[in-house]
Image (tube, helix red, strand yellow):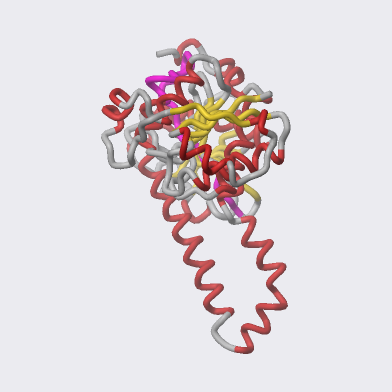
Amino acid sequence: MIKIVVDAMGGDNAPGEIVKGAVDAVNEREDIFICLTGREEAVARELKKYTFRQEQIEIKNATEIIDTGEPPVNAIRKKKDSSMVVGMNLVKNGEADAFVSAGSSGALLVGGQVLVGRLKGVERPPLAPLIPTEKGVSLLIDCGANVDARPSHLVQFAKMGSIYMEHVVGIQNPRVAIVNIGAEEEKGNALVKETYPLLKECPGIRFIGSIEAREIPHGGADVIVCEAFVGNVILKLYEGVGATLISMVKKGLMSSFRSKMGALLIKPALKETLKSFDATQYGGAPLLGLKGLVVKTHGNSTANEIKNSILQCISFKEQGINDKIKECLTPEENI
């Protein structure tokens, strides 16, 4: 049994959608055990709404909640009985294999490094979400953890991202590219110019050069390397444009009687196409390079995203991703 801790009080839709997602996960898989951290009475009240195998879910009482607006370091330090700190301590102490939360990103990043801790050799742990593309999915690394990254950090991101894509997603010899403002090697800011030759000479990865933002939705690379400021802008724009286009398509289809009739004919195909661009089906963003798995989901996550975030933890554990990351990092990269 793989034990996964879920922060029942984190996110805009807690605890309702969080608990429902956990129930959906155990109803789909018999090989996982879920520990819900949070205010016991509130969590138990939500659980009573569903039918599930009782032996697969337990509640770990945590009386405090870390709000999104709180300073992350102070929150982790002072709220020791929060659902997030209690959950990450279970991973730290080896009592659980993974932790999933839709709560404060800042607190999760601080807690991941301070409580769970980094693997030996990892300079900075990056957040790495899967984003939908025309050819399937790509890994965007980093999207929010390290806004002032150094070239050595980006090289490690490329290595860790390649391991994740090959062993969790199943893409053999994944293509690695660095985000740039042009395809030419001499283009880019100081960070990109300094990192490019390091990636070019890096053993164990398939570096294909630079990738412009417009090529990302087309699946131009499997692992997209950047520092967190750029990555977060890409991710948020990606989500915003996707939601806007879907809204405009729906509005257009409902604009006249003729379009409504056409909508009835294309609805099944359109629904299937749009589903492939729904990021929630791919789960959350793992914080790679920690001693235990920590996964961040969107603050407004619904049950489906929580369920998929839980299920992605299974592949991570079964494939021994942390062991593979430790093996790929050379002694010279140790901090």
Q: Residue furthest top?
A: 331
Front residue (pair 5, 277): 5
Instruction: Say which quadrant the C terminus sits in.
Output: top left
Q: Is residue 160 magenta?
A: no
Identify the residue at horizontal 64%, vertical 55% (top origin). Answer: 276
Residue 160 place in picture, x, y as percent? 54, 28
Instruction: Give residue 20's quadrant in the image.
Output: top right
Q: Position of residue 196 (x, y in %)?
A: 45, 34
- From what the image shows, is residue 27 above or below residue 61? below
The magenta region covers 112-133
Q: Position of residue 85 (x, y in %)?
A: 40, 26
191 or 253, which lies in front?
A: 253
Say which quarter of the image contains residue 114.
top left
Quarter holding the N terminus is top right
- Residue depicted at 63% across the width and 83% down the height: 260
Q: Nearer the viewer, residue 203 or 258?
A: 258
Q: Is residue 147 left or right of residue 28?
A: left
Where is 287 relative to 49, above or below? above
